[in-house]
Amino acid sequence: MFIHNFKYALKTLFRNKMLIFWTFAFPIILGTFFNMAFSDIEKSEKLDIIDIAIVETDEFKNNEIFKESFKELSNKKNKDRLFNTKYVEESEAKELLKSNKITGYLLLKDTPKVVVTTSGINETILKYVTEEIKQTEKIVENLAQSEIKKEVEKKNYNIDYDQIYNKVLEITKDSDANIKNITSHNLSYTMIEFYTLIAMACLYGGILGMVAINQNLANMSSNGKRVSVAPTSKGKLILSSVLASYITQLIGIFLLFIYTIFALKVDYGNNLALVILLATVGSFAGLSLGVAVACLFKANDNVKTGIVISITMFGCFLSGMMGITMKYIIDKNIPIINKLNPANMITDGFYSLYYYDTLDRFYFNVVSLLIFAFLMIAISMFSLRRQKYDSI
Amino acid sequence: MTVFRTFLKVLNKCKTPIIMYTVFLIFFGGFNIQTSDNSTNFTASKPDILIINKDCEKGITKNLIHYIEKNSNIIDIENKEEKINDALFYRDVNYIIYIPDHFREDFLNHKNPKIEVKSTGDYQASLAEMMLERYMKIANTYNKNLSSEKKIIKNIDDTLSKQAKVEITSKLDTDHLEKATFYYNFTNYCLLAGCIYVICLILSSFKNEHIQKRTIISSMNYKEYNRKLLLSNSLFSIVLWLFYVLLSFILLGNIMFTLHGLIYIINSFVFTLCALTLAFLLGNLVSNKNAINGIVNVIALGSSFLCGAFVPMEYLPNSVLTIAHILPSYWFIKTNELLKTIESFNLETIKPIILNMAVIVIFTIIFVVITNIISSKKRKIN
Amino acid sequence: MKNVIEVKNLTKEYKELKAVDNLSFAVQEGEILGLLGPNGSGKSTTINCILSLLNFSEGSIKIFGKEMKPDAYDIKKDIGVVFQDVAVFEELSVYDNIDYFCGLYIKDKRVRKKYVEEAIQLVGLEEFKNFFPKKLSGGLLRRLNIACGIAHKPKLIFLDEPTVAVDPQSRNNILDGIKMLRDRGATIIYTTHYMEEVEILCDRVIILDKGKIIASGTNAEVKALASIEEKVSVEAIDLDKKYIDEIKKFKNVDEVIYNNNILFIRYKKGKNNLDTLLDYLKEEHIKYNKIYSERPTLNDVFLELTGKELRD
């Protein structure tokens, strides 16, 4: 009986185009969109070559440090090249700036002046570099002064400027900061988008759970009436239908994983077993959500599907699907909302697997999902245990 | 009139899902713009830095902190490693500096103490790192040459005070224009989703097989019938559009009362008409109510992601943008993006905007023509 | 004769409405019992109560001599139900649908295969075996609905308005099928608001109105409840008024109407009414074209008992 029902439940699920679309196709389509939209975001966070102009004032022509520095930073052979520099008259520089051909230009008089149209990253870099050069100039000046002072104090009036210059260079040489970057390698925040996608797919499985319940309850569908008058235990039937839904859902999730891992190159961290655990538990939570919706609301399939989709989309919205910042804002300011949000439990689970080395947070999410699922099932039980109805 | 009255009746019947959907979208739009600061404001020029100081706040340590504070936005985050890591991941902070214990002492003893940092590796983090590196380099340099801490600090300050003057020529209200563009780009999704959802829902009632049989045998020309339906539907679209325009006045304020604001509004109006005809076309193609939800999501989310409604155009790969040319959303969003860079309106600056709108109008006409071709073919039911 | 179903004092109340009011009846083995009544008279509610789908306020229900409960599987295995709404899976073919529902009763695959084929034959869907429900016309869909309910060869079959909105061809097919089921030995409960069906099909009939039994018995017994014996119409042109007055005085005559050249006479209980009339017509040399005599229908009974037509 169990297998008979299971077989046909699978058959009906796979023939239902709507279900297949929402649980199989839609997450893959959405994932493709995400990939197209986000693939370049993080790459473009790295620096581009900036177009600038330098006004050839006398001060600039006579300032070796500035001249050499910009020459080196604009050198096409330099792998750390920052600028593409044009040397022009001031009027031309203004013209270039106005037509947006350059980010800004440098005007070197007594103090350097940077002229830009707006404040932005490239503009800031131009300013930083200019300042850096100016400050280096100042260091050299200060050091030279102090060296000369030392020589003078030693009553040595026959100053060898070459020697002092070399000494100054010596001092500046090994002065690099001792900075150690201890950031975790996994910092790609667009991954969150894909994690919400998995969360969405898991929760959409609720539609499958809902169908399994509707088909077997006399007060939900006419098919359910027919099943109710058959000499089979309702519990067994529901269990086998729900299992069929769960398996269908897991197949969908599995395909989504294959697609996101191999086609979209999504990084789920290194612990595959835990990824599978989370996906399995997440799907179970989604399934139980659908079961609860099916039991609690007496409405037709379309309305119930609408409810599951709305809950899912709203949950995903809060966990960062339409803007990753949303998840952070909620997590930071009203964490309780996301602690109750199954979409976030799944998203956050993947996030903690990906980003954190410790597993505390991951297991917290897994346990939360289990609690959520059992709560949903407990609620459903009230309706499921009933065998007779007041009205059909 | 009959068509219009029936339209209103059908609209009234579907009001619950329509109102729900609209509220949902408006909520999305409004909420997103409120939280948009962090996610889109990539152009902030000061990095967000968190300093965790394990040393006492004296001497060189104090000076370092003071310098960083002056040149960045200091972010205050609860001193728990997990909170800090989250903040870094979500770019709430770009750069975290851990000043070690005994930093001052070790520094003065020429041990060049190790400073641990965490970095998001983006622009801002690079700026922050440049800042820290520069300070330490200068400090180390003077440390070798000078003996007293006081002198070192004085020299550092002296050196760092050499700054470049910056002149900003543009008088554009960049911040507000940025927000307006963000808002109107987002309406791309709201308008498309709203129009397609509602119009498909309503048309699915009109295009019901049995009802359609009746309208086909009626004496009304199918083109006229389509035109009347389209007009009725346009009423809804325009109300929806007015909603978003009104919301933009509330959320964005003064910027909407400028010439820029007017063009944002005109642009969105042209796009609304296009969304309307697209929705109308889809409504004619799809008669299954169940399929509507899927179509809405694929088309509205698809054009929004591909054309830069959610992710700014400048961050999209070129290949995606090339594909996006075939979508009306692209031209709509392109105008919004253009608007935030235009300083003064003259024939030259406004020409590309008019061209973009013309493309949207062409799309609109194409959609209407295809709709008529399809319904003329559909007059014979298979 | 054994009683297959015994319903005693069944009462089912919705908030305001008494859908079933103190109903008691029994169904005997091998008969077709017609539950007749207008829409909303409580037919479907009664069936749903008997099937233990609905809670009811009072009363007891026994099937095959045992109390009916939701988990009385030994009873359920011999019951087949055809509900008013078509209850089939859109996603399954005709064959798969029948196989699925039959599979809830019959475990043995080979037996099931035979049963499913037989059910398909019974309702005449052989050519549509691999069709999906969407492609079936209303009548064929009803037939599938029936096949799904009876494929497991139940001893007791409930048919809840199986012929609503069905074309005549399918209706005849369905009615023939039901007779065949009875001939195979099944007991059948058949609800409808088409009295003609009850008259052709049912051995016994229960007429319900507002949740109460207003008449029950065999067809003839129920009809005997009517106060009239027969209705006679005579087509006679330009009949003189004196004849009409004369006929009115005949024994058993209840009412005489002459309208549009048709003389309509209703008789109360009594014999030889037609003979007397024919003799009189001959005697008076009254010319007539056609003459019909009708026995009272269930509708007449219903009309008399409730003052309203069975079908509104």
Image (spheres, rainbow, N blue to C red):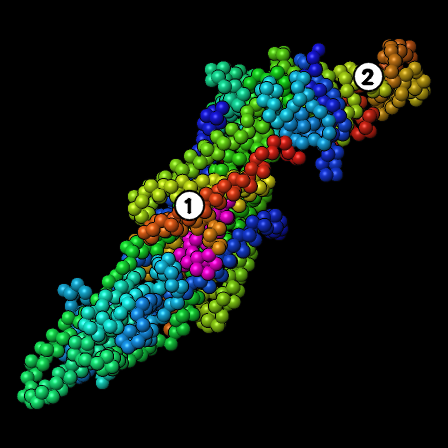
Taking the magenta stretch, the answer to whether it contains residue A334 is: yes
Q: Name the residue rendered at 52%, 43% in the picture.
A: A375
Q: Quadrant of residue B128?
A: bottom left
Taking the magenta stretch, the answer to whether it contains residue C121 is: no
Q: Is residue B220 above or below residue A148?
A: above
Per the picture, the main secondary structure of the magenta-coloured stretch is helix
Image location (x, y in percent) of residue C131:
49, 26
Which mark's residue is nearer the viewer, 2 or 1?
1
Q: Name the residue rendered at 24%, 76% in the picture.
A: A131
- In the picture, the quarter occupied by the C terminus of chain C is top right
In the picture, measured across the screen, residue A364 lies left or right of residue A110, that is right
Q: Is residue B215 above or below residue B91?
A: above
Q: Which amino acid type corresponds to the residue marked 1 in the rendered image?
A: Val
- Chain letter of the residue carrying label 1: A
Instruction: Give neighbour class at mark 2: few <14, some 14-19, many 20+ (Cα, 10 Å).
Output: some
Q: Which amino acid type corresponds to the residue marked 2 in the rendered image?
A: Ala
- In the picture, the quarter occupied by the N terminus of chain C is top right
- Chain letter of the residue carrying label 2: C
Instruction: Say what secondary structure mark 2 lies in.
Output: helix
In the picture, measured across the screen, residue C233 lies left or right of residue A81, that is right
Comparing A223 with B349, the one in front is A223
Which residues are the magenta region? A308-335
Image location (x, y in percent) of residue B41:
38, 65
